[in-house]
Image (tube, rainbow, N blue to C red):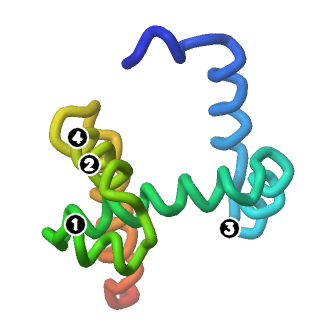
Amino acid sequence: MNKKIKTDAVDSLFDAILCLKTRKECYIFFEDLCTVNELLSLSQRFEVASMLKKRKTYLEIAEKTGASTATISRVNRSLNYGNDGYEMVFGRMENQTAEENLPPSQ
């Protein structure tokens, strides 16, 4: 964990995010918190990470997302040498999807 970002203010922000319960609540909160461009940039990076995980090429990613090669490279570096945050979230999302597709218990 980067010690530069570990502050009481960041802890408070993360606590607020952890309080959100629905996608609608996320929209409401993040529209107040971020500019449209900030939110679109965050979602673009997440989409880039998802496509890199699926082994898409930089060209395919740039064409679909509009991300620059610099952004794609930065996200790729995080995927390969970061703290595994993307992998943690992707794994949880895959597990959640798998659980949602299970037949109901009898």
Q: Of the residues under marks 4 and 1, which one precedes in the sequence?
A: 1
Circle 2: element type: helix
Which of 45/99 is in front?
A: 45
Q: Nearer the viewer, mark 4 or mark 3?
A: 4
Q: Position of residue 81 (x, y in %)?
A: 18, 33
- List the residue tagged with mark 2: 73
Label 2, residues with CA under 10 Å away: few <14, some 14-19, many ≥20: some
- List the residue tagged with mark 3: 23
Relative to 75, residue 64 above or below: below
Circle 3: element type: helix
- At 34% from the left and 41% from the top, the residue drawn is 85
- Quadrant containing the C terminus in the rendered view: bottom left
- Quadrant containing the N terminus in the rendered view: top left
Residue 58 is labelled as 1
Report the number of numbered marks: 4
Relative to 2, residue 24 above or below: below
Q: Of the residues under marks 4 and 3, which one precedes in the sequence?
A: 3
Q: Nearer the viewer, mark 4 or mark 1?
A: 1
Residue type at mark 1 is Tyr
Residue type at mark 2 is Ser
- List the residue tagged with mark 4: 77
The residues bearing labels 4 and 1 have C-alpha atoms spaced at a distance of: 13 Å
Q: Nearer the viewer, mark 1 or mark 3?
A: 1
Quadrant for residue 64, please give it: bottom left
Circle 4: element type: helix
Q: Nearer the viewer, mark 4 or mark 2?
A: 2
Q: Position of residue 79 (x, y in %)?
A: 23, 45
Residue type at mark 4 is Arg
